[in-house]
Amino acid sequence: MFSAKKKLSSIIVFLIVLQLNIPYFVSTAQKEPISVVLKNDGFFAENITLEDDAFHKSNTLIHIETWYFDAKFDNNRTIVFVYCLFQIYNKGFLLHGVYVYENATIEFIDRNITRLNYCTISYDKPSLLIGESHCIQGYIDNDTGEWKYSIRMVTKEALINLSFTQTAAGWMGTHLLGWWLAIPHFKVTGCIETSEEILQVSGTGYHDHNLYPSNVAFLTDGYHFGSFGGDQLRITWARLLKDHQSPEVFALLSEGESRFSLIPADDVQVSVHEYLFDHGKKIPKKWSITVNNENVNINLSATIIDAHFIKIIGVRYWRYHLQVTGTMQVGSLIEHINTKEISELLYFF
């Protein structure tokens, strides 16, 4: 088991990690859920509103809040956006970054720090203005009723304009480690303009929004997380890694644009079949996710294409690019899955 001294060091490192834009899925709530609609093994899930995905006010001494978006494009490029607000009372700053990959290999990274007094943020809807340009603008289309996000980012390498249109039910919940909001599937279109080319892109995406506790390293030794599936069915899963204990696994199934359901923990199995050694650590190379009950049958296999390793003192983190294949069935609905996905693995030392 970690000593108290090591755990305290990990907490300090956790704050540093956030400043360098490494996304976590674990979080803690600063406002209570209005009404719990689903509960399973300590996790609560409920429907979300646009306001839930806005910035959250806090009266705590230290407030850390992040937004994460990723997109997987048809041209073998992928992109990850991370926005992290760090605030002590009414003073603070925003860390905003983008990671662009080509064929699962990092192409470029751009990260910046902006003081909050140069940012305009909304507590009523997902809206972030840095200087004169919107970085995030979330809204509901008046004509179609679709939930959309417009993301714009200007870097030294590129001008990025993307539109995310929600195609799966979003949810939020309070897990053992805190509060987490996720929308597991989008259609994504837009443009990436560089000095060499203008790329019109299309693909699929994922988004989550977290509020973080400072004591996360006391609650877990790390996590393994992902969201896999097709256009109709998605499974969002996580393994909480605990020293000398079996991982705690949970999963939530999204069906279409309006339905989600928790899967009983006893019905979910995440099995690692092959490992590799990377940067001194044994990490999963190939694993499967299976669910079998009277209404849900899921058999998915995930294999590494590449892994982007990020090391900071006290933390080891991998952002996986994966090939995911298999089948997902709910009742009479069956989807055959053959997709490229992004997944995460993190260990505290």
Image (tube, rainbow, N blue to C red):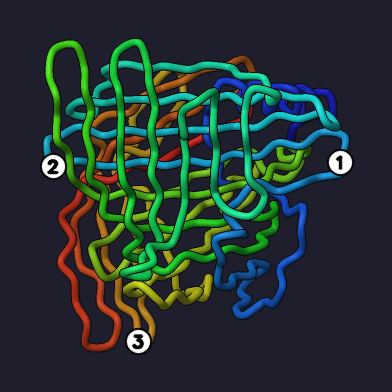
User: Label 3's element?
Assistant: loop
Indicate which disc residue 74 carries.
2
**Crowd tier of the residue under label 2, counting other residues whose Cα lies within 10 Å: few below 14, some 14–19, many 20 or above:** few
Looking at the image, residue 344 lies above or below residue 145: above
In this rendering, position of residue 347 left or right of residue 5: left
Closer-to-camera residue (24/299): 24
User: Label 2's element?
Assistant: loop
The amino acid at mark 2 is Asp
Looking at the image, residue 155 lies above or below residue 65: above
Indicate which disc residue 295 carries.
3
Residue displayed at 21% across by 33% down: 191
Looking at the image, residue 249 lies above or below residue 88: below
Circle 1 is placed at which residue position?
Answer: 60
Residue displayed at 78% across by 38% down: 215
Comes first in the chain, label 2 or label 3: 2
> x, y percentage for residue 267?
45, 74
In this rendering, position of residue 25 left or right of residue 334: right
**Crowd tier of the residue under label 1, counting other residues whose Cα lies within 10 Å: few below 14, some 14–19, many 20 or above:** few
**From the viewer's perspective, is the residue at label 2 or at label 3 nearer?**
2
User: Label 1's element?
Assistant: loop
The amino acid at mark 3 is Asn
The amino acid at mark 1 is Thr
> x, y percentage for residue 97?
47, 24
Which of the 4 image quadrants contains residue 321? top left
Q: Rounded to the nearest whole Å, what is the CA distance between mark 2 and mark 3?
A: 32 Å
Which of the 4 image quadrants contains residue 90? top right
